[in-house]
Image (tube, rainbow, N blue to C red):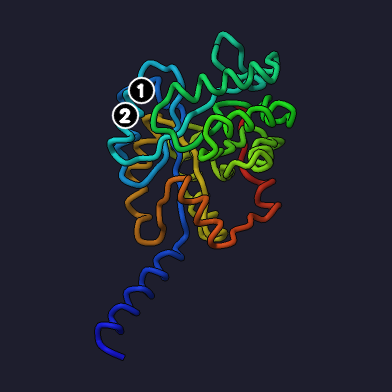
Amino acid sequence: MTRAWLILCIAFATVAEADQRPVLSLVIDDLGYSLDNGMAAIDLNGNHTYAILPGAAYSQKLAQHAHQQNKEVILHLPMQSINSTAAHEPNALNEAMDEDQLTTSVHDLLAKVPFIRGVNNHMGSHLTEFDFFMRPVMDSIRGYNPGLYFLDSRTSPRSVAHAQALDAGLKSISRDVFLDNEPNPESIRLQFNIWLTKARSRGSAIAIGHPYSNTIEVLRAQLPATNGEFEFLPISKLIETRKQRGFSADWRDQLSALTTTR
């Protein structure tokens, strides 16, 4: 074996070993309301994903900034929750819509945010529980762009959104941890550590947080310490990585995943 070939083999072995590190994916939701907090979230070090609301005051500017920073952008699609009202989220998909109205609304909202690679639900603890609502929503996303993926935020433990996205032919994946249901630093740090533990035990884990000041401060402090042990990937690449590694989540782990009503 020549020296050059030996060096090449060592290099390939190093890459293969690095590719087996546990993978973390971080999604920051609700971008568009605050310019300063949105910019701070996008500027966090790492290959993260940013869910941008359609039609919010700073949505276009934040999507542009994220794209310029080579960060992944997705549409944060508003859906009716158990506690929401139409006045609170006037663009939200809701149970009063028929299939044609759902399709029109989905296409209109998808067009409002540039550079999107996928979609996740904003709120939706009510609507995501029903396959007869989720089926036309997923069909509409695929009809708009079959290359988009769907991330189920799992705002309800009874969500069928992930299953319906797969049935519609979309790439899909589900959230594992909410970082800031309780937006105090102690709770955020606890959820951050749960995120790491899930990734270690299962090979990968997805956390969703929000552009709260406390969340951003905790992430700034905690993220640098994870770089050696974990690999950070945006959601689109995590989906492919899970497929390559043959990932299959344990059903008990799915049932025990922390949920919140949004």
Disc 2 on helix, strand or loop? helix
Which residue is depicted at the point 69% across and 20% down? 99
Circle 1: residue type? Gln
110, 228: nearer the viewer: 110
Q: Position of residue 202 (x, y in %)?
A: 57, 59
The residue that appears at 40% across and 56% down in the rendered structure is 231
- Please say whether residue 44 is visible from this viewpoint: yes
Asked if disc 1 and disc 2 are in contact, CB closer than 8 Å, the reply is: yes
Quadrant location, the C terminus? top right
Taking the spot 59% from the left edge, 61% from the top edge, the residue there is 246
Q: Is residue 150 left or right of residue 29?
A: right
State the image coordinates of residue 48 (x, y, percent, origin top left).
39, 43
Q: Residue furthest top?
A: 87
Amino acid tagged 2: Gln
Q: Is residue 89 above or below residue 77?
A: above
User: Is 23 located above or below residue 210 in the figure?
Assistant: below
Q: Which residue lies under the disc numbered 1?
A: 60
Q: Residues within 10 Å of mark 1 (few under 14, many from 20)?
A: some
Q: Based on the displayed image, in which of its 4 quarters is residue 34 positioned?
A: top left
Local secondary structure at mark 1: helix
Q: Nearer the viewer, residue 185 or 141?
A: 141
Residue 130 image position (x, y, % from top left): 73, 29
Mark identifier at residue 28: none
Quadrant into which the N terminus falls: bottom left
Q: Label 2: which residue?
A: 64
